[in-house]
Amino acid sequence: MAGRFIEVENLGKQYETSVPGTPPALQSVTLAIEQGEFVAVMGPSGSGKSTFMNIVGLLDSPTSGAYRLNGEDVAGFSTDELAHVRNRVFGFVFQGFNLLKRITAAENVALPMVYSGTAGAERRRRAQELLDKMGLGAYGAAMPNRLSGGQQQRVAIARALANHPQLILADEPTGNLDTQTSGEIMGLFTELNRETGVTILLVTHENDIARYANRLIRFKDGRVVHDGAVVHEGAA
Amino acid sequence: MNVGSILREAARSLGANKLRTGLTMLGMVIGVAAVVLMLAVGTGAQNQVNRAVSSMGSNLLVILSGSTSTGTLRMGSGNAPTLTTGDAEAIARLPNVQAVAPTFPGGAQVAYGINNWGTQVLGVTPEYTSVRDWPVEAGEAISETDVRSATRVALLGATVVEKLFDTEDPVGKTIRIRGQPFQVLGVLKKKGQSLDGRDQDDSILVPITTAQSKLFGNRFPGTVRFMFVQAVSQSATSAAEHDITLLLRQRHRIQPDADDDFTVRNLTQVAEAASQTARILSLMLGAIGSISLVVGGIGIMNIMLVSVTERTREIGIRMAIGARQRDVLLQFLLEALMICIVGGLIGIAFGVAGAFAVGKAMQIEVAFSASVMLIAFAVSAATGIFFGFWPARRAASLRPVEALRYE
């Protein structure tokens, strides 16, 4: 594989706003993420951490700087290629779950496979397998709003895993969950990272959550102010 | 992703939100049904009038004998025995006149076997059937010989045949008119209603001389009640009207300052007025239908715009998990198509059913035209598809992060 997994250089993002002189959401961010890392991104509101994640996840584009994925500059990707990467290489987990409300849990899990052209029978098999893995084997036919927050987030994680992604992007995945459920969801991420080697990029503003990661990147005013290994005190 | 699974995705999406789908379809149904219904009624009315007009015969004038006056008391027209067979012959020689059909009508009770029926009996000459454009369907027409020798023969209208003869062939049978035996010469083609709504088929034609001398014993031999005059062409009707007026005033020796003792009525003008009225009615119904189509279109537009815009976030989610722009567009296009096709078909069904119901309830004729249905369908479908597709395209061309942020 040519180059490193994810590499950003001098990344900057300036939103178009009506207020002139607004500081950029992101400036001169240079860093790299290797396969298999579990990275937590922290920072106060407006620090640019979500903007960073959206750019890395190809949901948004930077206004300056370069972003190379496996050595390829994504600036040259067509919208179809971007969709392809989001479909096959990435998996998203959002704070608000972002499940489609009108279709069942299993259909939600199978949706990325609809767009990757997987046959119907295989889609259903894989969706069931993933739900089983998330401990939701019996809830495939349930509509998302009949499930608890924790269950919905597990469905979303199952959906993120559908096409065997290399990177899971999780934007405040525990933001809407209670402490115990949050712990369970983070346990799941840790397990996935250890067992399958999937890279995880986690955005959070809670220290307790960030502690599950191996590496911590802190943002402030659009810049990286800290980037280092997570210090695990005692037997955490 | 192939079209098949997109089609299923679109169908699933429609089925998942039945209220939204139903409301969108409703606009389509109402728009199309209104147009189909309105125009069915309008076209039906126009057809009905046109048929009545053409059943009258073409380029016709009718001459009624004048009113009798006793002192200052003036009776209705047709009362005075002022028109004669001689007048008819003279008029027939005028250059603008094609044919003249003098008529002597009367009411009579007719009987065949155990059936009897009160109907109108018209004493006519052989010209009558051609002038009135009323061909003999079976048997023979009244001949000159019949008129000359005042034979007791009759041509029956369709209604009379129906009332007197059940399934029997009437030609050659003998019926009784006012107790006198008449041989049935032939049967007239069904003509339908006249402009004033009378059943024209409820009549019997006999030779005019027979009517004058044998059926309705006349104090003034050789007089007729009215005559139909056929002009050589439509443009000649006015000239013929003028010539006839001059000729009759001369023949009847009317002083220059005295009133006519007859009335000439130009039926072409009556027919034109009726056709015009029907055309205006049809146009008006068409206009109302078009307004419904526009209103329905606005309804479709609104609900499509709102429902698709409301799904911007869904589009964002779909794009985040790997849907390409064209996957999203194709899905929304197919959803709009399905709604429009199903809604349009239901609309046509409702329109047709509604038109039949209205036709039945109000005893009027309705007529359908495929092109009207097609236009109504196409206009509504185009509206629905455009306003289903356009906001989806707008949403799909957003960066996924913007679509996701949409609440």
Image (cartoon, coloured by chain):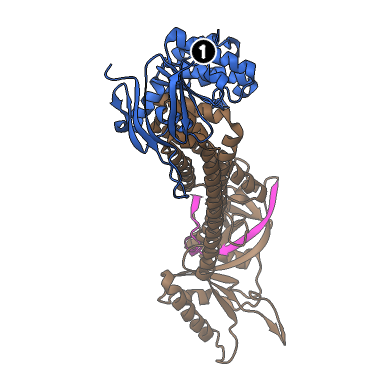
- How many labels, in total? 1
State which chain is coloured brown.
Answer: B
| Nearer the observer, A104 or A40 | A40
- Among the 4 quarters of the image, the one containing residue B169: top right
**Magenta segment: does it hold A61?**
no
In this picture, residue A35 sits left or right of residue B120: left
Residue A17, x across and y down, in percent: 46, 46
Q: Is residue B19 in view from this perspective?
A: yes
Which residue: 57% across, 48% down? B34
Chain A shade in the render: blue
Residue B277, x across and y down, in percent: 55, 64
Q: Quadrant of the N terminus of chain B?
A: top left
Q: Chain of mark 1?
A: A
Mark 1 residue type:
His
Q: Which residues are magenta?
A: B115-138
Q: Residue furthest left?
A: A2
Identify the secondary structure beneath mark 1. loop
Which residue: 52% across, 84% down? B251
**Magenta segment: does it hold B134?**
yes
Residue bearing mark 1: A232
Residue B354, x across and y down, in percent: 61, 44
| Nearer the observer, B118 or B215 | B118
